[in-house]
Amino acid sequence: MKLGLQLGYWGAQPPHDHAELVAAAETAGFDAIFTAEAWGSDAYTPLAWWGSSTTRLRLGTSVLQLSARTPTACAMAALTLDHLSGGRHIVGLGVSGPQVVEGWYGQKFPKPLARTREYIDIMRQVWAREAPVTSAGPHYPLPYTGEGASGLGKPLKPIVHPLRRDIPIMLGAEGPKNVALTAEIADGWLPLFYTPRMADTYNAWLDEGFARPGARRSREDFEICATAQIVITDDRAAAMAAIKPFLALYMGGMGSEDTNFHAEVYRRMGYSDVVDEVTTLFRSNRKDEAAQIIPDQAVDDSAIVGDIDYVREQIKVWEAAGVTTMLVSPGSAAEIERLASLV
């Protein structure tokens, strides 16, 4: 088991403590730091900024939104950061949802699996630098010859020779088809709400992908970097209460009332009635009530909250389920040191 520091995305203002947390993670032996993006801060700028002060930590995105960049633009950013960091970059990608893709980026959302496959193929062509990059489309045709095209587009190879021809790509997948695709074409999986209780189900989805012709990886060399809120405390009730508003947001407030991929994760865990009630309350601006009705078990499924002995044992449970890295969000250098002592 390894640990990754999940810095996430910014709220209304830039966080004030990330330099301290990154330095502590480097010193404590964490494997990686990860940044994220929603519709505010981007993932690459803070990752490069904080990564410049490290020498050993891997630098990952969890996750970049596909629609924020063309595949060649994403490949350029990745090869640039990989050079600057001496080969420490991990590209974590996700499709987001139609509300963000169409409402924020002004792009089409349908066919997310096909778009992901095509996007990654183009990125790997850029890094391989074996020939000018082309794509038959239909989502990212290169050269573009569609409506309004000048007809002058030319296939190109990157000017810069990538440091690595095969930068690792991980996918933030949630549904069964997307997880199977992840096992087929990616190097790792970045689940947001992972629960060891459903490990057999996840493994079946992954095994479907591993069994496909041309799959890149097998279970032996595939990474599962799961987001895990770990709180070492003797006051479980208070810690649980602090986590529930976050779950209420993702369970009831993300996406739209009838299209929320995070909510579907909790439905698969068996919380359909809870999801329905949380969604109704959250979208009626009764957010405190929405958080309060979430049962402790729903928190326990995707977080570890308890005293140090309980946390130590639960980390072993996650490891036995197949998780290779736990992405955690400690609030201080002292918490980072304490977590590192358990792994």
Image (cartoon, rainbow, N blue to C red):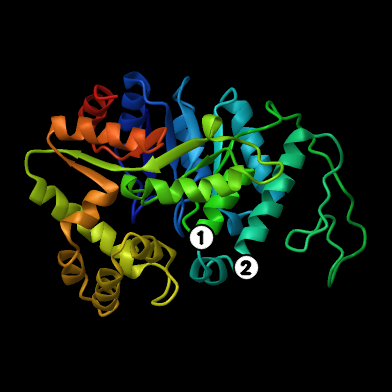
Q: In the rendered view, would you say 52 is above or below 91? A: above
How many other residues sit within 10 Å of disc 1, few (<14), some (14-19) or many (≥20)?
many
Q: Mark 2 to mark 1: distance in Å?
A: 12 Å
Q: Is residue 294 left or right of residue 253?
A: left
Amino acid found under the numbered disc labelled 1 = Ser
The residue depicted at 33 percent of the width and 48 percent of the height is: 195
Question: In the rendered image, which quarter is residue 102 located in?
Answer: bottom right
Q: In the rendered view, would you say 189 is above or below 22? A: below
Q: Is residue 210 left or right of residue 55?
A: right
- In this rendering, the label closer to the viewer, 2 or 1: 1
The residue depicted at 42 percent of the width and 26 percent of the height is: 31
Question: In the rendered image, which quarter is residue 334 located in?
Answer: top left
Identify the element where label 2 is drawn.
loop
Q: Position of residue 243 (x, y in %)?
A: 21, 53
Q: In the rendered view, would you say 34 is above or below 139? A: above
Question: In the rendered image, which quarter is residue 83 located in?
Answer: top right
Q: Is residue 306 left or right of residue 104?
A: left
Q: Position of residue 58 (x, y in %)?
A: 49, 28
Q: Quadrant of the C terminus?
A: top left
The residue depicted at 84 percent of the width and 68 percent of the height is: 146
Observer-nearest residue: 59 or 165? 165
Q: Quadrant of the N terminus?
A: top left
Q: Position of residue 161 (x, y in %)?
A: 76, 29
Q: Residue furthest right?
A: 151
Observer-nearest residue: 63 or 156? 63
Observer-nearest residue: 198 or 155? 198
Identify the element where label 1 is drawn.
loop
Residue 64 appears in the rendering = no
Amino acid found under the numbered disc labelled 2 = Gln
